[in-house]
Amino acid sequence: MNIWLRNPFIIFITLFLLFSCTKKDPYSCISCHRGLHPGLVSDFENSKMSDHFSCEKCHGIKHSSKKDVSKTVLPVTATCQNCHEEKADQYLNGKHSIAFKAIESLPFTHNQPNAFIKGRKGCGGCHSAGFDKISDRYEKNSLKPKYGMGCINCHTRHMFSKKEAQEPESCKTCHTGFDHAQYEMWSGSKHGSIYLSNRAKGMDTKRVPKCQTCHMVNGNHNVITSWGFFGVRAFEKDQRWANDREVIFKSLGFIDSEGKKTDFYNKAVKLKMIRTDESEFNKIRNSMVRTCSKCHSKSFVMNNFKNTEEMMREADKLLAQAIREITIKEKEIPKMFSFYDVNTIYQEVLFNMFMDHRMKSFQAGFHMNPDYSTWYGYAKMKQDLIKIKESLK
Ligand code: HEC
Ligand code: HEC
Ligand code: HEC
Ligand code: HEC
Ligand code: HEC
Ligand code: HEC
Ligand code: HEC
Ligand code: HEC
């Protein structure tokens, strides 16, 4: 008789091994892919999810060889939502999930080279979130990139790590640079410099906040702030500020020269680029104040908000003045949203005044970085105004 059949122990072990292999990788995805890209497979094997299932849970089973690769499915938010309903629902109610819709909504996006959008070398690189249905991804003639989905912006493939996402560097690739230098502002602030130096020494980092402490309280994936990126809201009690904002709204194309709301305004409200709901604004603000109040007095915190908003008002005053000067010369309101597709020096300076310097003057206020508020923000706006006046002569 065969030695295999004679020894029940060997039979047991063999069956067990066979069973556990097929259970872990029933479609041989891993065994074939290990030879193709071992780095990818070892990341997945180091992820917590690999204890529970294999590749097919996200990519389907329609492809199983070199010849049918095109049948593979690339996952979308809904794929993760099947098992992580709460996180996905929160995420879908927040700002990240509409990042692609935001760039699509701008009138000039279609002038950008396609590689910038679909190829993810520019706007599309940071804004590729927003595929909720598999069909979104494969929409014909769509501007949407083939690769890129929202959850991996912080839980990188194929480790999908919670720990990695909890570090401020997971936000850095996007929240950096020209018009949203939050990483630089935070890392240079007292909060950031204490965090980074304590982390490097293995000391307690919890005494200071990182991005997630303030923007993802208790791991909430509904990420949104009161003012938002552009720092424009439709309601304003201060009449002078409201007048300046009206000029800015006209230049952004939100209202026409007669003050009527445009189609772009309606899109921008839907995507929450403009904040119109005062009670929602206050609700988000109050929750932020509660977070700060874990470590500071309420009056210290409110003082910080009050002063930042005063900075915004001063910055808007300069921006509106620049727009008014150009309007007198051109007899027409300059279009600020044309990005770098402009013909004159003063339009180019105006764009930078809005996108670069005005942003820094208030974003740095919210992120406690006096250097950015002053020298890269308000002071530059003053310079911009001089340049605009000079080039209008
Ligand atoms: C016989 C080998 C083999 C098996 C088995 C196999 N694959 Fe692949 N797979 C490939 C090859 C080859 C490619 C193309 C790789 C390349 O472009 O470098 C590929 C590509 C892919 C891609 C990338 C598609 C893209 O558009 O970038 C995914 C995802 C994928 N496979 C998932 C799976 C899953 C899930 C299974 C199991 C159900 C599986 N594979 C089984 C060989 C295999
Ligand atoms: C079939 C169900 C299923 C799907 C689909 C799924 N997950 Fe998971 N995920 C799990 C399970 C189960 C765990 C818990 C693993 C553990 O703690 O042992 C987990 C854990 C995680 C974690 C925490 C890992 C850690 O380090 O603690 C993250 C992050 C995560 N998944 C992200 C995703 C993303 C992103 C997607 C979509 C691309 C996704 N998951 C799709 C079942 C799933
Ligand atoms: C480095 C990454 C990155 C690149 C490249 C990038 N963006 Fe963004 N974009 C962001 C981030 C981060 C935000 C949110 C910033 C904030 O709220 O302060 C944002 C916000 C926006 C918003 C505002 C969304 C809203 O609802 O308030 C628009 C519109 C936008 N970007 C358009 C573009 C366009 C168009 C391009 C290409 C010309 C582009 N972005 C390139 C990262 C990027
Ligand atoms: C929890 C869900 C999940 C599992 C499980 C998973 N993937 Fe992926 N995979 C993704 C996501 C998300 C992307 C990124 C899609 C994109 O770029 O839009 C991706 C992309 C890919 C790509 C193309 C991009 C690249 O980096 O090359 C390949 C190849 C791939 N996966 C192979 C695999 C293989 C092989 C396995 C099993 C070892 C696996 N995946 C398991 C979610 C998963
Ligand atoms: C902006 C960054 C970011 C994005 C985008 C993001 N996550 Fe997370 N995720 C985090 C952070 C940070 C944590 C850790 C939260 C905490 O400290 O409890 C986390 C935790 C998780 C966990 C672990 C929950 C637990 O406590 O065990 C899961 C599961 C998860 N995310 C799934 C997802 C899914 C699914 C998506 C896409 C729908 C997604 N995440 C998108 C940053 C992000
Ligand atoms: C101490 C808390 C705190 C920390 C830490 C923090 N932020 Fe903020 N952040 C704020 C506040 C407050 C606002 C403005 C909220 C409002 O509109 O009322 C804000 C606003 C934002 C905005 C909207 C545009 C803007 O800048 O005003 C983005 C995007 C943002 N933060 C990203 C980040 C990122 C990325 C990090 C980490 C590098 C970070 N934040 C760290 C408190 C914080
Ligand atoms: C892949 C790029 C990317 C990464 C990584 C990323 N973000 Fe964002 N974030 C964006 C874009 C793009 C937007 C603007 C989306 C929109 O409003 O349409 C945004 C918006 C935000 C906003 C909302 C601003 C508003 O309008 O109210 C906050 C706050 C924010 N991100 C914080 C974070 C934090 C914290 C992390 C890290 C845990 C992070 N982000 C990681 C690209 C990214
Ligand atoms: C986890 C605790 C923690 C949270 C949450 C926190 N801070 Fe801080 N903050 C600190 C510590 C510690 C310092 C460093 C103290 C110092 O500079 O003397 C600091 C410093 C500051 C400073 C600069 C120091 C100064 O005296 O001018 C400001 C401003 C500030 N925080 C405002 C805020 C605001 C506003 C929020 C909420 C948006 C906030 N902090 C959230 C712990 C925290």
Image (spheres, helix red, strand yellow):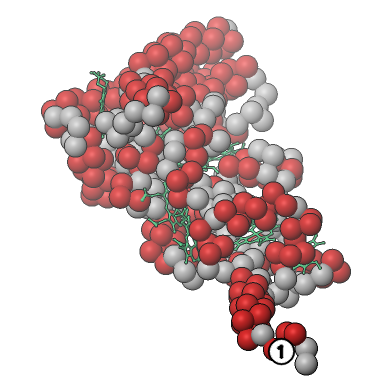
Q: Is residue 363 visible?
A: no
Residue 376 pos. (x, y %): 46, 15
Left or right of residue 387: residue 168? left
Q: How far across and down, in percent of the image, does residue 285 sit?
A: 25, 41
Does the image show residue 341?
Answer: yes
- Residue at 39% from the left image edge and 53% from the top image edge: 221
User: In what element is the residue under mark 1?
Assistant: helix
Residue closer to the observer: 55 or 372: 55
Type of amino acid at the residue the image marks with label 1: Leu
Dot 1 alpha-carbon crowd within 10 angstroms: few under 14, some 14 to 19, many 20 or more: few
Which corner quadrant of the image does residue 69 belong to?
A: bottom right
**Residue at x 32%, y 40% (from the top left corner):** 213
Q: Is residue 247 above or below residue 20?
A: above
Tally of marks: 1
Q: Is mark 1 within 8 Å of ligand 1?
A: no
At x 47% / y 24%, what residue is drawn? 184
Q: Is residue 155 above or below residue 80?
A: above
Residue 250: x %, y % from top left: 45, 35
**What residue is drawn where x is 71% and y is 67%?**
29
Compared across the picture, whether 233 is left or right of 46 comes to: left
Q: Which image quadrant: the C terminus?
A: top right
Residue lying furthest right in this view? 67
Residue 158 vs 287, above or below: the answer is: below
The residue furthest bottom is: 1
Left or right, 100 with reference to 119? left
Q: Is residue 237 depicted above or below 273 in this figure?
A: above
The answer to which of 328 and 31 lies nearer the viewer is 31
**Horizontal and vertical percent for residue 235?**
28, 41
Residue bearing the label numbered 1:
5
Q: In the rendered image, which quarter contains the N terminus?
A: bottom right
